[in-house]
Amino acid sequence: MTEKLLKIEDLRTYFSTEEGVVRAVDGISFDLEPGERRGVVGESGSGKSVTAMSIMRLIEPPAGEIVTGTIEFKGENLLELGEDEMQAIRGGKIAMIFQDPMTALNPVYTIGDQLVETIMLHQHVSKKDARGIAIKALEDVQIPNAPARLEDYPHQFSGGMRQRVMIAMGLSCNPDLLIADEPTTALDVTTQAQIMDLMLKLAEDRGTAVLLITHDLGVVAGFCDTIQVMYAGGIVEEGSVEDIFHNPQHPYTWGLLGSMTRLDGKHRARLHSIAGAPPSVIDLPVGCRFRPRCEFAIDICGRVLPAIRPIGEGDQSVACHRAEELDLKTLDVDVDHTKEVAS
Amino acid sequence: MLAYITRRLVYGLVTLLALSVIVFTLLQASGGGPLDRLKLNPRMQPFIQQLTEQWGLDQPVWKQYTTWLKNYVSVQEFAVHNAIPIIAIVGAAVATFLIVKFVRSQWTGTYLLGIWSVALYLALRNVTIRFNWGISFQGAGDVWDLVFSRTGATFRLGFTALAIALIIGIPLGIYQAIRQYSFFDQLGTIGAFLAFSTPIFIIGVGLQIVMALYLERWTGVKLFYVAGMNSPGYPDMSIVGKIADTAQHLTLPAISIALISLAGYARFQRASMLEVLHSDYLRTAKAKGLPRRKVVIKHALRNAMIPIVTLVSLDVAFMIGGAIITESIFGWPGVGRLYITAIGTVDYPVVMAIVMVIGIGIVVMNLVADILYGVMDPRVRYD
Amino acid sequence: MNTLWRSRKVTFMVLLIAFALVAAACSSANDDAGGTEETTTTTTAAPAEETTTTTKAPETTTTTEAPLQRPYGGEAIVGDAQEPPTLNGFVPGGDNFIVGIIGQTYAAGVYEIDGYTLELLPELVTELPTVANGGVVVNDDGTMTVKYTIRDEAVWEDGTPISGDDFQFTLDTIMDPDLPIGKSTYEDIIDSVAGPKTFEYTLAQPTVLYELLFGEILPKHAIEGTAFEADWNETRWVSNGPFKFESWAKGESVTVVRNDNYWKTDPETGQQLPYLDSITFKFIPESESLITAFKAREVDVIQPDPNTEVIETLQALEPDGARVEVLSGPVWEHLNFQFSDARFEMNANSCNEDYNMRLAVAQTVDKRVLTDEILAGQVEPLESFVDAFSPTLSQEAWAQYSVDNGAAAESYAKAVEATGKECSVTFSTTSNNDARVKMSELFVGMFEASGIPYTNELQDSSLFFGETLDNGQWDLGEWAWVGSPGLSGLVGIFDIWDPEAPPPDGGNYYRWGVEAEGAYSDEASARFAEVRDEMNATVDEGELLALINEGENIIADNLVIIPLYARLVTAAVWDDEVGGFKHNPTQAGHTWNVEFWYRTDI
């Protein structure tokens, strides 16, 4: 068995607010193989981004704190590293790109400045060489006339172009892991597809592992090898893309799939939505966190929090008491028994 | 850019014109006249009439205004005092024209350079900037001389206060933002609110009593003066003595002005810095692996300083008008104090002159602020 | 008199400037509120008032053992809230009090005012001309000639003797039609003759006002050929006083230095005057700061706003070596009635025309309460305006009225009956003077006790002195006049009741006897007009005294005004630093004997 690139165990990241302690990430564990592209899927507030920020160790005390857990990157526990060592990993070994390319670049410096800065930070090269690398990086993300555009400011680029710059910046130091936090959410559909294709190509070419955080299952389908579905700070289901899409084991995953717009028109007759709202991560319900919205909930769901456990023959795991007895794939999401949105 | 500046200047002129009309009208409407102090002497009546006619106070308000405006913008006074510069520049222009037209040779450039060097030298050497702003109604002579005899003192006090406010206020705000909600931050916040809510009068008088009066009683050494800009024996002092004397007089008024600006800058810088610290691009910078110091100094500071530029630029404009209250408290011979005296004696020409100087200062500093804004923020474009 | 006042006008202008700045700020901008504080001071003198006379009872001087010799050298620093707009006392702005205060150091004229006796003393002349000493002669043709003999030793700072030509030049300068100089009385001079050490002039008719003419003499040799109005605002011509002008740091201070050619010697020590090497006048507009500066010994002498709190603060410094002089001043406050129809704009039910109404007011207003409450009992109420000038001449003509609420109610009832109106009183004065505001508050209770309907309608001083007074738009008013020594001042004050001289040409703001404006005129006002005319036509002291007495009685018997009290004046000096100081409550001010000041610490 090859060494895991990333191995997270029982990670808990809590935030203290005036209303109480927010358990944003509450005991998750997962692994990432080198070169693996994993989708992290869930609604807003499910803990996806906090997971990413925890890996980058960008959770700012005193408000946020990683309470327990280990984040092993290439066998090294990131949580035990000093700030200096962590700085070498950020941007160098693990790069991150963000949701809104419009605001993620510093408006008062040229993109050349910002790229060269990153490159010189992690690679011991001269400014001139760093510039060469930057031009190459821009060319890699298919920005035309790259040498000239280095002198431009972020506001002189379109949204899609800016995200390309972000990707170029992220990949300029050949990281082992790229965390992409909703990289296409702010972009229009056509641009989204172009960016995802570009990322896929670059990641495949370089063998970069990617942690793609998104709420869009459609994006995941075309890009990822594996998926983990998060709900209220915990992972409710994980497995290969194929398994999850064809054989969802958790009612939440099943619901998410149902709410997905299929471009092939298979399910276009009706769009399904999951009734209710995600629970407050301050006042989590006892038992299964999805229970209040789950149409299959039974007595035990209200008492015992289901642990995640392997199911079936593959690598699929699920956190549901009734996973075996429910045969969700046979239920057509088009049927009428889905609950209406209660609001 | 040039078009932008021109347009802004035109707007500025219109604003100033409107300002002058409004202030002039309000001055007239506020009641009282410059000759009121003579009125209660029954033997002064013919004298009052004489002055009323001489100063045009019997004219309708609009006529008084147009007379004032005509004088204020008149270039005649300027021309009279600048015969040599004007002749030099016009002469050089004529010579340039003639040489270019008739004496083309390889020496043309040298000729022109020589002519313009002499002309500009003469012009700059002899230029006297002065306009006819009228005569003070309180008998204090030519208004231009009066106002500009006070600007030196006002600048000395204003720039010192500004320097103190900037040097302390900006780093304070930055530090508070970085250590948000720390003890120091809370202390700074309380201090700023105290500085804001204490009337400047109390601050000034308090500093005088504690720092000038009691400090001397306790220590037996005169460290600071209650009032004035220099001691009577100043001209005969040594260089060191002069510097010390200046500092002894300047410190207290400068602090009392700086305190409020300082609190303002600190609050503003803190807010602006906090906004930047929570911005996406700062997260990007951190995610790139930049050390915290570099994140703050390179990425946060430059952005957080942009709004401060406007604030400081306008403060500079306000400074031109002098610190009205502080100058009075500390007996500082500046423009603000002149302004108060002029209002008290209903000295229209002086009041108008000072209001307009401040107005011009604001228009110009606004423009400067905008241009600086553009220099600091590449997103700003002038069109 | 510099007062710390929360002037509505100043506040208004400060707001105005704030507004102006905001208006001028075209682009969005954060304006710093630093400029809009409300408290502030002004350096304006309270609209000042008229000159009048007096000879106050000589004060007994403390018998200190005078040293035979005074030390020479050293400086004194005089703190003042006001800065002169100009150093030229003749042109507009020169009427400011501080111009005269500084002027005492380098300007001399025919007379000076003795701070101990408050009498006029000869300065540049050998003696003051009077009818008795032959200096004043009423000619057969009804004109009057005055003759000065100039002291032999009197010279300008450059050694040039002071001559009759200088007097003539002074007269010519004042009468120059192109110069904005007050010409009153001087314009009645129909002839003049200048000699080397004499000067005489003839007035068209006898008038005692000659007394105060030629208070400052100009040096012909220094001024002739200059632009008098423009050239002498920031510097001085050659001095004929104990000091000479040295420098003026605008906004800060004026310094004068010893005039080595000063002609006077100290009669007590026989030493040449002055003793000090220099005097600096330091301008600190904020009265609070001025007092702090005095406490910190940054200034040696101050003449602060004489409120009781300040006086007590300063008196607390006496153990440390300070000395505070509190004197009854020349500024006398008075209640008065408007007689013209313009008063109905303020109060439609004004019954000022009825004597009983005025009597009711006199029987209602308790002056003793006012002096106790406003001046902490430091001064007696006035029973006549003459007291404020010359107690010896006063008949205490207002003593005939005493406070009696019952009698006041009866008088009021009579007035209501006689006029057929619901008579009431509306009181107006300046709202930015603490003492007057307090007075208005006290009046409320007093009038209520008499059962007279009463309202306060105070106004900002700029409005009150700027418009209300001119137009006669008040019912019951209150303000102050200022006195000055000499008979001429007392004669001059009668002008304010002259039925022939209402504003704008005269000073009879009350319009008493001015029939044209709806006021009543009767035998009393007609007789008063005659008395005033006679006063202005004689220089005989005996006749004048009789006329002054009659005039006082007419004003008192008719209750044209009600004198209230004289304001305090005060000055403080660090006695352990500066000796020879004596405050002078008249317009001469505390620098009147500046040549006698000396350092006590050298």
Image (cartoon, coloured by chain):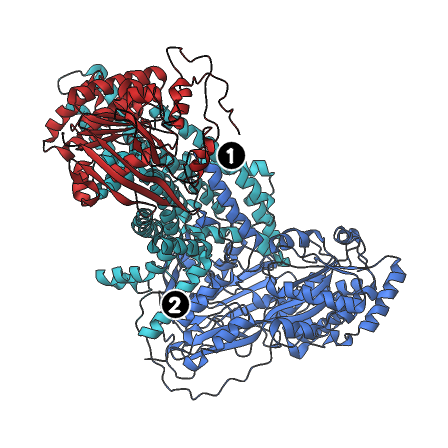
Distance CA(mark 1)–CA(mark 2): 45 Å
Q: Colour of chain A?
A: red
Image coordinates for residue C513, horizontal then vertical, percent:
78, 59
Q: Of C439 and B143, which appears nearest the observer?
A: C439
Q: Is residue C261 above or below residue C39?
A: below
Which one is in front in this view, the residue at disc 1 or the one at disc 2?
2
Judge whether residue C237 can be spotted in this image. yes
Q: Of B41 and C176, which appears nearest the observer?
A: B41
Q: Of A66 and C117, which appears nearest the observer?
A: A66
Same chain shared by disc 1 and disc 2: yes
Q: Residue visible at 44% across and 18% down?
A: A333
Residue C67 is marked as none
Q: Which chain is cyan?
A: B
Question: Which residue corresponds to mark 1?
Answer: B18
Q: Of A16 and B357, which appears nearest the observer?
A: A16
Look at label 2 and name its amino acid.
Val
Image coordinates for residue C532, horizontal then vertical, percent:
72, 65
Image coordinates for residue C98, horizontal then vertical, percent:
48, 63
The chain that hosts pointer 1 is B
Image coordinates for residue B237, horizontal then vertical, percent:
25, 63
Look at label 1 and name its amino acid.
Ala
Question: Which residue corresponds to mark 2?
Answer: B210
Q: Colour of chain C?
A: blue
Q: State the SS at label 2.
A: helix
Q: State the SS at label 1.
A: helix
Judge whether residue C76 can be spotted in this image. no
In the figure, is residue C245 to the left or right of A315?
Answer: right
In the figure, is residue A79 to the left or right of C532?
Answer: left
Q: Is residue B183 above or below residue C560?
A: above
The tag earlier along the polypeptide, 1 or 2, is: 1
